[in-house]
Image (cartoon, rainbow, N blue to C red):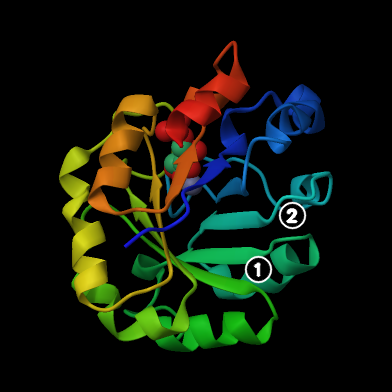
Amino acid sequence: DWMKIEISPSILACDFGKMNEDISSIEAFSDRLHIDVMDGHFVPNISFGVPVLKWIKSDLPQDCHLMISEPWKYAKDFVEAGATIVIVHSEVYGGDSDGGSLEEGLKALRELGCGVGVSIKPATPVSDIADVLRLVDQVLIMTVEPGFGGQKFMADMLPKVKELKEMGFEGDIGIDGGVNAETGAMCKEAGANLLIAGSYVFKSDDRESAIEALR
Ligand code: DX5
Ligand code: ZN
């Protein structure tokens, strides 16, 4: 089926000394903004948090990708800081955590009034989120190990797109990590409708062309 392709530059790759200038440089050509929050615990890197989100000046919808161990503690702060969609990782729920089940977490997110997304790391099968697909607007498939920009695209994650569709998921299917013109074409071919790209867009001399090459 035909679906509009949306491009969401990841600000992790921008120059934080001039973050809003960098965001302005892509705003007219982009559909959404992708905002990577890392806590140094769920992933082996620390990026930025709520104080930085508050400084983002953009009219684009802001997808806040929480790579943090306890999203239930902080989600409300991110919504108040401007997140349009809050995306949590399925892997942080269950076990001994006090965050409840993934299902409870996603329902609580919805009550905050934001859009809801769930992300899965490369090792996590789509079957792990089968029961919660009805609760989310976006599934974010990681095509790198979360934690850093500029990594190599894992093409063997792409069958997850088809699996989601076969399960009847009709929301946005985003691909995150290592997306460029070449790998982006593979994502679209696989049926994804949302491409996240950090390095490819922000390190390009011609960001408009880079984004158009992804469409
Ligand atoms: C990885 C992040 C990605 C990253 C993508 O942990 O979730 O969103 O910013 O960066 P590139 O496009 O450079 O792989
Ligand atoms: Zn991300």
- Residue for point 59% across, 66% down: 86
Q: Give left or right: position of 77 versus 110.
A: right
Amino acid type of the residue tagged 1 in the rendering: Tyr
Q: Residues within 10 Å of mark 1 (few under 14, many from 20)?
A: few
Q: Which residue is mark 2?
A: 50
Q: Are marks 2 and 1 in contact (CB under 8 Å)?
A: yes
Side of 63 relative to 80 (left or right): left
Circle 1 sits in a helix, a strand or a loop, which is it? helix
Q: Amino acid at mark 2?
A: Val
Residue 40 in view (yes/no): yes
**Foreground pick, 204 / 35:** 204
How far is disc 2 from disc 1 in space, using C-alphas?
9 Å
Q: Position of residue 85 (x, y in %)?
A: 61, 65
Between 131 and 195, which is closer to the camera in this rendering? 195
Report the residue at 44% width, 44% height from top: 195
Residue 128 vs 211, above or below: the answer is below
Q: In percent of the image, x 35 and y 36: which residue is there?
A: 184
Vertical side of 19 occupied by 204: above or below? above
- CB at mark 2 closer than 8 A to ligand 2? no
Q: Which mark is residue 16?
A: none
Specify the quadrant that holds the N terminus: bottom left
Give the quarter of the image for residue 159: bottom left
Mark with earlier residue (2, 1): 2
- Give how far across and how far down residue 145 sits, in percent: 32, 43
Dividing the picture into quarters, in which one does residue 17 lie? top right
Instruction: Kindly identify the residue that appears in the image at 57 percent across and 75 percent down.
Output: 72
- CB of mark 1 near ligand 2 (< 8 Å): no
